[in-house]
Structures are given as structure tokens and as C-alpha cells.
Image (cartoon, rainbow, N blue to C red):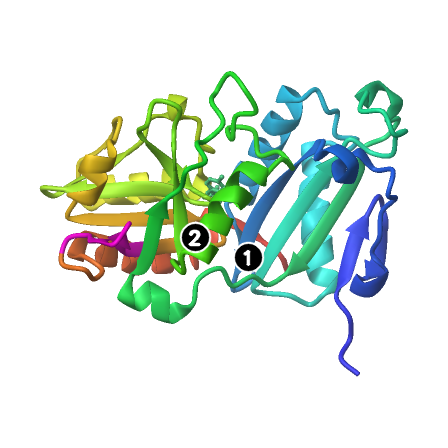
Amino acid sequence: MEKELLVYIDGNYYPKSQAKISVYDHGLLYGDGVFEGIRAYNGIVFKLKEHIDRLYRSAHTIMLQIPVQKEEMINIVLETLRRNSLKDSYIRLVITRGVGDLGLNPKKCLKPTVIVITDTIALHKSETKEKGATAMLSWVKRDPVDATTHEIKSLNYLNSILAKIEANINDVDEAICLDKNGCVCEGVAENIFIVTDGSIFTPPSYAGALPGITAEVVIKLARKLGYEVAEKNITPYELFNADEVFFTGTAAEIVPVREINKRQIGKGKPGPVTKKLMEEFSKLVQSPSEGIPIYK
Ligand code: PMP
């Protein structure tokens, strides 16, 4: 029998099938918690420090005191990977408000639950990445910045899930959420970029998207390659008429989009800017200077 992956929960490691938390945990009852999705490539945890920093910013915003310091959290992630002998992995870090009673008051939750899962993920098939994905604008808008904003990477993903359901029932690969003003915001678990006349644009932070770590990496990479990159409001009209559209995300990496709401994007296949960025990004993620090694 194949050895089961070990999952870290509050200081202990459990085989995947026995890694369980209480039904009274407010992460389950109310989606009260925060999380991160991180990737390790060839023994290097890509941008681990940046993900840990974002995790603590999310937690700070919802006044959730993570019971371990950042340095220790990094070690827990690395140790979990080592115990599972992993070099390439998708890591899910989850901090919930912890066990409380059936009321929603977080005051009743005495200790946050810390979970580290190291496994794999496949969001989009390699064929989709080669040909380009199909997408649609969803009827569900992104929560605004003065509500349950997606700037917080919280356990409340129903907003994205509703959009994904629309994509599923319409048989397209991905959904795109608009912001409350009707401008383009982001994918369900990806940031979004358009390329118009050789320049790259992405929605501004007040649109309410998650400040993506992949997006930040891609912006830096694009500028280094000589492209102009700017934040700007993007209307559906501009999206439909862009030369290229692509998503970025830790799990998704870079995904070209070839069609949105049945309108062909550009030439209906991955464009030259997106292809160049995909090529350079796949080299960058292997670079030891871009992350923290699992095995010293
Ligand atoms: N937006 C949302 C809503 C997400 O869940 C994700 C995935 N973490 C992203 C964007 C992309 O962010 P990152 O590149 O940091 O993974």
C-alpha cells in the first residue's frame, strides 16, 4: 500500500485519512479563518516568505492571532514537506478561528487551529494552457473592498464558488468576476491581465481582488522584459477587445484565455506576450533565489 501523506494539525502529524478537525471549528461553521496556497518547485518553496507575510496580513485584518511566529510557521511548512519527502508540491496553509460554540461569536473560540497540507493540485489541464482557456463573465460580482473583500485570503470563498458553478454549467474553463462598478476584477482564484497594443494592464487594487503573489512576480518579470505594465480599470468592452488575456495564480500559474462569453480574444490562441511570460515564469520558479529550500 502506498504511504499516506502526513498532514500537520496543531503540532501533530496525521495520515491524510485521519487528519480531522472538530465540527465545532468556526472555520467549518462560519468560514472564519484565513489560508494560503503555495507551491514548491524542485525542492524550493517559491516565494514562501511572501506567502507567510500575506497570511499574517489576512489574519491581522480579521483579528486572528496566529499562535506561532512567522519563522516557526516557515519551519512547519518545510518540516511537513520533508516528512512527506516532497520536492514538488502544492501547499495549503489554513488557520481557523478554532473550536467554539454554535454561536458565531469568535470570542468563544479559545485557540486557532493551524493546518498544513502538502499535496498536489491540477487546476487547468496542460492542454488548456497550450490552447488557451475559455471563460465567461459571471453574474456574481466580487465582494467590494468595504465588505468581505478578497484582499483578505479568508475561508469565505462562496463568492468564487458561485462564479465557478456558472462556468461549470456553461461548460467553460473559468469564470471572471466584475467589481461592484462593473469593471473586470479577477478570476475565481486567479488575477487577470490584458495585453493591448503591446502594453499589459491589470485591475487596480481597489477593485477588491486578492493581491496576487504570482501577479506581482509576473509584473516584475514583464517590466524586466521591457513591457509596460499598468493598473487600470478594465471594462468588459476592453476585455473582449484585448489582443491577449491571461490569468495568474499559484495553482493556475499563467493561463492564456482564448475566448470570453463566446467572443474570440485576439487570434483565439495564446498570444506572443503571454507565451513569452509563461516561458520566463517557468524558468523563474526553479530559481533557488526565488524561494526557500526544503532540504539544506
Ligand atoms: N485571486 C484569488 C481570489 C485567489 O484565490 C488567488 C489564489 N491565491 C489569486 C487571485 C492568485 O493569487 P496568488 O498568485 O498569490 O496565488
Residue 40, which numbered label? 1
One can see residue 226 in this view: no
Residue 135 is situated, as x and y percent measured from the top left of the image, at 34, 52
**Where in the figure is residue 76, as x and y percent of width and height?**
73, 47
Q: Is residue 275 left or right of residue 144?
A: left
Residue under pointer 2: 167
Q: Residue, x 53% and y 37% (percent of image)?
A: 159
Q: Dot 2: within a 10 Å radius of its alpha carbon, few (fewer than 14), some, or many (20 or more) residues?
A: many
Q: Nearer the viewer, mark 2 or mark 1?
A: 2
Near-viewer residue (19 or 182): 182
Report the span colored magenta. Answer: 256-266
Q: Secondary structure of the magenta portion, mostly?
A: strand
Residue nearest the viewer, comparing 126 with 47: 126
Taking the image as shown, residue 190 lies to the left or right of residue 223, namely right
| Amino acid type, mark 1 | Ala
Closer-to-camera residue (161/214): 161
Q: Residue at x 38, y 58 (%)?
A: 172
Instruction: Please give the count of numbered marks on the rendered protein.
Output: 2
Is 192 magenta? The answer is no
Tags 2 and 1 in contact by the CB under 8 Å rule?
A: no
Q: Would you identify the image quadrant in which residue 139 lies?
A: top left
Above or below for 109 versus 134:
above
Identify the residue at image location x=87%, y=34%: 99
**Mark 2, secondary structure of its residue:** helix
Is the residue indicated by label 1 positioned so its CB lies within 8 Å of ligand 1? Answer: no
Give the quadrant of residue 287.
bottom left
